[in-house]
Amino acid sequence: MVQGRILVSAGVVLLISVGIGLARFQPSGSTTPTGKVITPLGEQTEVGSFPVNMVASPDGKFLLVTNCGFRQQVSVLDSTSGKLLSRIEFNGEEGKERKSLYFGIAAVRSPTGGTEVAVSRGSEDKVSLYNLSDSGELSSISDVQLPAADNPLNLPNHVAGLAWSPDGSHLYAVGNQSHAFNDFRGSLFTIDPAAARVVTEVKVGSFPLAATAAPDGSVFVANEGGREVTRLTGGVGMPQTINTGEAPTYLTMDHAGKTLFVSNSNSDTISFVNLADSKIKKTVLLRPDRLKGLPGATPLGSVVSGDDKTLFVALGDLNAVGVVDIPSGRLRGYIPAGWYPTSVALSPDGSSLFVANAKGVQTLNPNGKPVRTWGQYGPNIIEGTVSKIALSDALSNLPAVTVQVLNNNSGFSEPQDKEHINNPGIKHIVYIIKENRTYDQVLGDEAGANGDPSLVMFGKDVTPNQHALAERFGLFDNFYVCAEVSADGWNWSTSGMGNAYTERNVPYNYSGRGRNYDFEGANNDSPVSLLGRRDVATAPGGYLWDAFLKKGLTVRDYGMFNSDGNDAKGPDGKPIAEDNRPTKPNLVSRTCTDYRDFDMAFADSEAWVKLGLTPAPRQMKAYGSHHDPSRVTTWLREFNQYVQDGNMPNLTLIRLPHNHTSGTAAGMSSPRAMVADNDFAVGQIVEAISHSPFWKSTAIFIVEDDAQAGFDHVDSHRSPTLVISPYTKARVDSRFYNTDSTIRTMEELMGVPPHNEYVATARHFYVFGRDAVNADPYNAIMPSKEILGEVNERSAYRSADSDLLIKRFSEESEADFELNDILWHSIKGRRTPIPKTPGALWHVVTSQDDD
């Protein structure tokens, strides 16, 4: 028997027997698009989209699960078998206002007997009360409406966490929304459930999420937008601030009522708070030692064993449950879970551990054909589960299953993946991020690779440059974006991960339930980082540009993380954000403000000028101080100056958004025209660099921020990517790569240390040779004048709906599940079927019905 040492957490060493028990707990794991292997234990019960919170009924007979994704439901599970007993859906009907759930669920023994359950309704600003029967059925009691929030942004209070008072006489509800008009402070409401009314409101911290009540009547609120927990006596007393860690989210109390456990999701720690004096007793780090300070565990929900000796913590980004010894405050090990566990519970006898997996246990979710009755939209077809795990087996084999978790999170095992890249002379990185395309949509027509030509929408006739570049510099048919949509996509593409706030709120936002787009440096329209406040959506470890600047390298930004120019005024009467200006401090002096950011009315390339085309009626003809006709024109001006001065930045960030399209909105360029324009912009950039003195010292990386607006027969995350340099060559590379592979490769080439655990364990692109075997200049291929000149007419398929989408949504992708239908039928033909899927394509706007 060979003994080995596994470092698990700071100061913790486990002795394990290598090979003993591993076979039992090592099923054939599969890799998620984020690059992690999952090997979930136990039986699975499906519970809808993105289960986010789970609590036990007071008698211990039932588990109550709520979620915040596309298909929302409150699920009642048997706490012994884990089987689904009943559910209530909150999805509304096609074309109607969406019903809503959001995070909060709490149960108490009713004064009249039985169990009373409270459920938060998010942006609907109400709390629903139910009776829970002995058979596990929920029946409605009443709805409690919160008072309307007073702010010119028309934002609701947005009900989040719920907690009952110890005697069940009052219910506490968290108002989560935080913005300039409430000084970025949420609220705690006290509700009289018998009268179904709110009796008090007290201000707490920024973006408060969870609440819990102690035996002495104190109420605790976790303020995710800050670094603290608020304590209020009786829910109304003078607020007391307890500094814990960054982004406190979930709260759990021991059975003795002596200790509060706070999950600090951005800090990867659990704080033990002494309830007697509100002091921090211990802080436990939950990430493995091998990460060497890199974030990537993300503690969320937790539960305490019946004897108050063990704390089980869901670790979203480790796909595991941490096991913490409470008396010593030491991490004992990890238990494998599904994809992004958010919450945990125990059976009444403590024999079973239940884990809510937000993204379930299926790592590949193809959407080339319908998924059950849910349709083909990526975020909607991912099914969350609850795992039932035999706890005695897992704990008796804890060293072995801990090794399994560490292996699942250790990255890839091929020898080259453990080596650093041999940099052949790269000094400059150009990072281009585009919008929303799947692999099959664009490159499914490439022979010799794993594509489905029937799903191609923007093939070689529309994207000749991307095809030519893939054929010359490498075709990657097993590349995945890590995100589901643009909101998390822009964080994964620039940070290498999304934090708990982003992961939870993105599906809520995109399912049309009325929450703002907070994910590119603005929280409720305010560039909070520029105001000295914490951006609630910033991932731990920061951004790619932060890592480059920390290394002493130079950065230039063209269009990333800029404000969208809303007209709202702040409390002082001044604009909350200035149009087309950076939202992050490190980009302020490094952003070209003449470069137009996300705006479908402005061209990416100069093709329309070079072809002598009349611009579409709604196209912006010029932008910026130089009145440039396209984004590439602006970039080229500065690039030519770099050539003249010999000082090209080490990292150039370029946003090319036009391939997002505006659907079939009348007066806008057609989807094919916008994608063709975007394709020529890619060609122009590569042409300029390859004809310059910087060519042999430059690597160009091109990704989509997400792959949400299309179909793919392998997985809804599979997407086209390009890695272009004189040192890469033609071949089909079918190894697994993803968004974090791109970031890791860029950082390794430039000697920049990885800034989070995902990047550190990602497989880099193994494509760079030592010699410049592909150094000939590239000449951009002009798009077809016929395609580029296409303009949407009012008679186009769902033209009016496309126009409503533009007017309704200010951010790029909040309604892209609509665009899937619009793009398919406008390009493939109105009679080319995609299945009718009302459960997936909830038509938020339906002004016309074209069959």
Image (cartoon, grey):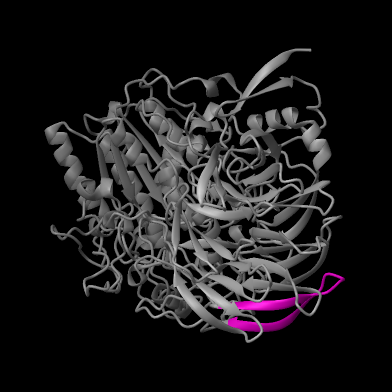
In the depicted view, which residue is nearer to us: 296 or 161?
161
> At which x and y percent is residue 700?
36, 36
Residue found at the far bottom of this picture: 195
In the depicted view, which residue is nearer to us: 121 or 689?
121
Task: Report whether 54 appears left or right of 502.
Answer: right
> At which x and y percent is residue 146?
53, 81
Q: Is residue 523 visible?
A: yes
Residue found at the far top of this picture: 1
The tally of labels here is 0
Residue at (60%, 64%) from the top-left corner?
Answer: 103
Q: Is residue 781 visible?
A: no
The quarter of the image holding the C terminus is bottom right
Chain part drawn in magenta: 126-144
Residue at (56%, 38%) from the top-left corner?
Answer: 284
In the depicted view, which residue is nearer to us: 567 or 390?
390
Residue at (45%, 74%) from the top-left corner?
Answer: 805
Position above or below: 225 against 748: below
Report which quarter residue 373 is drawn in. Answer: bottom right
Residue at (35%, 36%) from the top-left corner?
Answer: 547
Let me know if residue 132 is in the magenta part.
Answer: yes
Task: Report whether 335 appears left or right of 690.
Answer: right
Q: Main secondary structure of the magenta part?
A: strand
Position above or below: 628 against 102: above
> At which x and y percent is residue 683?
33, 45
The quarter of the image holding the N terminus is top right
In the depicted view, which residue is nearer to us: 368 or 70?
70
> At which x and y percent is residue 756?
47, 37
Report which quarter residue 60 is drawn in. Answer: bottom right
Let me know if residue 434 is in the magenta part.
Answer: no
